[in-house]
Amino acid sequence: AAFIGLPIATALGAALAFRPRRRGTPPRSATVIQTQIILAIVGALVMLIVGASLARAFGVAGAAGLIRYRAKIEDPKDAGVMLAALAIGLASGVGLYLLAIFATLFTLVILWWLESLEPRAYRLFLLTVKAPAPDQLKPNLERLLNRSHVAYDLRTTANDHVQYEVELPLDQRTESLSEGILRLSDPQQTTVEWEETKHKNK
């Protein structure tokens, strides 16, 4: 039953989560879409475990309530994964070992697929470069940012500095970019400052 029920639950949950958005409605968060699909899987898995056993049903409800009120979870997707882990643990506890193993592997595949759809995480910075001739430095600086695949927006240009809003992937360090910027001008008269700011509202 699990080989049929879990894929069907996933497909139907995805159909709801990825439903066409009507004009004028707010965009859907990626984590909410992912959580809706995970919850469809969890619901099917719980029913496979419970079956006709009233005792198991009370056990699932009690354990889920404990997680809901005792665990502080910011990402709704993590809450869905926690419920999936709970259901897998319950399946193991009542001797449904094949179901627990299949559900674990199936959930891992779905999570890998869902997380591959997430936009790349980044940090937002204000990059300020102070130099004697920022207008001459600016074209080379922007070529460097483009070569580094960094998204940027010019904020200000003055007689002694140029400032950009820069999005850096989480795994990219500012030090390497700073070294590249300093090589574009006289390092003795050039300074590079990075100020991390809050993400834009998208």
Image: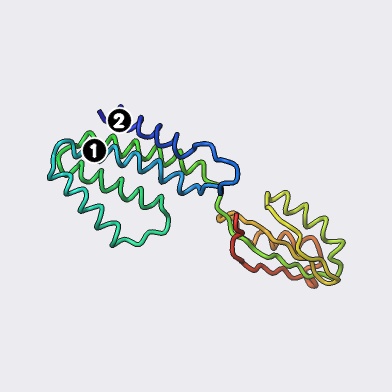
Residue pictured at 35% horizontal, 43% vertical: 39
Q: Would you call the spot at circle 2 few (<14 residues within 10 Å), some (14-19), or many (20 or more)?
A: some
Q: Splitting the image into 4 quarters, where does residue 183 fall? A: bottom right
Return the x and y of residue 4 as percentages of the image width and height: 30, 27
Q: Quadrant of the C terminus?
A: bottom right
Q: Amino acid at mark 1?
A: Met
Residue pictured at 73% horizontal, 62% vertical: 164
Give the tally of numbered discs: 2
Q: Splitting the image into 4 quarters, where does residue 171 fall? A: bottom right
Residue in front for this viewpoint, 54 or 96: 54
Q: Amino acid at mark 2?
A: Gly
Q: Would you call the spot at circle 1 few (<14 residues within 10 Å), some (14-19), or many (20 or more)?
A: some
Return the x and y of residue 55 as percentages of the image width and height: 12, 45
* Element under disc 2: helix
Residue 11 vertical placement versus 135 (above, below) = above
In contact (CB < 8 Å): disc 1 and disc 2? yes
Q: Which residue is mark 2?
A: 5
- Using the numbered discs, state the Cα–Cα distance from disc 1 to disc 2 in whole angstroms: 10 Å
Return the x and y of residue 120 as percentages of the image width and height: 56, 49
Residue 163 vertical placement versus 115 (above, below) = below
Q: Splitting the image into 4 quarters, where does residue 71 fall? A: bottom left
Residue 58 vertical placement versus 186 (above, below) = above
Task: Indicate left or right for 40 with 182 as reference.
Answer: left
Q: Quadrant of the N terminus?
A: top left
Q: Which residue is mark 1?
A: 47
Residue in front for this viewpoint, 180 or 123: 123
